[in-house]
Amino acid sequence: MVADDYGWNDVGFRNPSMITPNIDKLAYEGVILNQSYVQPVCTPSRNAFMTGVYPFKAGLQHIVILPPQATCSPTNRTFLPQYLKKLGYATHMIGKWHLGFCNWNCTPTYRGFDSFYGFYNGQEDYYNRSVVGGLDFRDNKEAVVPDVTKYSTYIYAERANQVISNHDKDKPLFLYLPFQSVHAPIEVPVSYENMYSSIQNEGRRKYCGMVTAMDDLVGNVTAALKENGMYDDTLFVFTADNGGWPTYHGNNYPLRGGKTTVYEGGTRATAFISGAGLEKKGYTYDGMMHAVDWMPTILSVAGGKPDDTDLDGIDQWESLKTGAASKRTEFIYNLDDMNPPICGHAAIRVGDYKLIEGYPGQYSGWYKPETVSDESYDNTEKQHASYGRRQLFNLKDDPNEHKDLSLSHKDIADQLSKRMAEYHAQMIPANYPGITIASNPQNYNGFWSPGWC
């Protein structure tokens, strides 16, 4: 389960003002991952989940794939569901893709999924399923428009129940649920909004309602698994794809920054693992985990191993299962040489230390969602003034990144910079093309559709 633009402080097990009983129950009964990292935005994280490879090695390090861009996740990489199918798994996907769709070979049912019910792009209306002048929804390859009176969590719950109920119990099941929630636009049925009537800010009130609607979807999925006798054999993996988006009411406080930054608020994910196979449960795990680790880890749970020998991901199943020390000691937050590097130029963590070089992304502050105005988020001028500068933090002593040690600990900063340069040597240029006119939905009966690259 992947929660979209989900804030660090937008979950009940961390913030009691949030109503997330289903997520909380799974998390408390499993293992809360306290240092699980992702990329600053959607597409790079999802590519990491599916391939086990850093985005800067796939050309996906610069922002996200936009609807009219003729690009997708490189097809020379084997996706997680393709590996799982070789192990006999049924593989189904419900929700948001955002890994490119200009060619059919880029789309979910060509990348290992037996079925796909959802949308190709990064966001859309929660009711009419439209984005940027086109409709965007598929039932496998067929362009469809689900009931426009139904909020998206309801239609996804219906499909999840259908997939689970119809599943051949003699085969193992991999169900990938990248939720639309809680990405903009900020839309939710009023019944959910009213659960947060004490919140004065309308946007924040609706956003919180969206969180609870997503939690109900989680509850519907777990209920369907129980009804079909599958719950006790299921391992649940839950992660955000990036931090909350401050402009759209996400709350990462007390972490610094948010979505589109390499600060912790943009990259340290709300995450947990719960259910079958865990030997130690009911605690918070402080070991380091990264988005690229999920592919080899989930494959290991299924009894497999990736054929690719050049993965960045590490099989962490033994550590997660038993509570042993993490096998990961370092990772790259992002490396992006394309100007301007909207989501952060370069950052690395080695042990407890984190180095940021150059522009870190738009949001540099610490944001309480109801105490700042939209103007408070506009740090562009200040941020660009720091472009070229480096920042060093000890995340063990200073997890919220208040004290820059780059001058007092220059030797450590130099060591991390040297290590990051070794990763930089492996980078391929960002594949971020301009707009392709042939993508126009009007060429495809009003739908964003494959067939133009």
Image: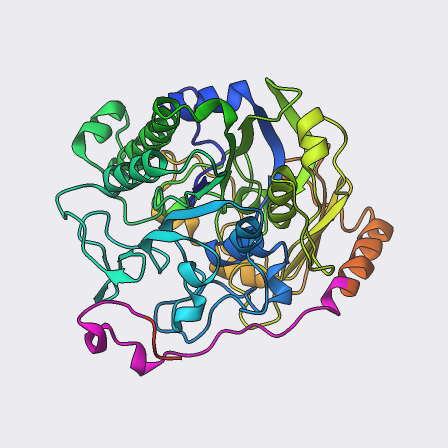
Q: Quadrant of residue 414?
A: bottom right
Residue 432 colored in magenta in the image: yes
**Residue at left offset 34%, top offset 76%:** 451
Task: Tell me where residue 3 appears, x and y as whole percent.
Answer: 43, 41
Q: Quadrant of residue 206?
A: top left
Residue at the extreme bottom: 437
| Position of residue 48 in the picture relative to residue 362 (left or right) | right
- Depth check, front residue: 127 or 311: 311
Task: Tell me where residue 42 appears, x and y as whole percent.
Answer: 46, 54
- Depth check, front residue: 422 or 53: 53
Task: Tell me where residue 364 appears, x and y as whole percent.
Answer: 53, 49
Q: Can residue 387 be seen from the camera position used here? A: no
Colour option used: rainbow
Q: Is residue 21 above or below residue 418?
A: above
**Residue at left offset 40%, top offset 80%:** 453
- Depth check, front residue: 228 or 287: 228
**Residue at left offset 62%, top offset 44%:** 299
Q: Quadrant of residue 214?
A: top left
Q: In this view, does 316 lie above or below 95?
A: above
Residue 428 colored in magenta in the image: yes
**Type of secondary structure dominating the magenta stretch:** loop
* Region rendered in magenta: 423-449
| Position of residue 205 in the picture relative to residue 260 (left or right) | left
- Depth check, front residue: 41 or 344: 41
| Position of residue 441 in the picture relative to residue 26 (left or right) | left
Which image quarter holds the N terminus? top left
Residue at the extreme left: 149
| Count of marks overlaid on the render | 0
Residue at the extreme right: 411
Task: Tell me where residue 67 appears, x and y as whole percent.
Answer: 35, 68
Q: Can residue 124 be seen from the camera position used here? A: yes
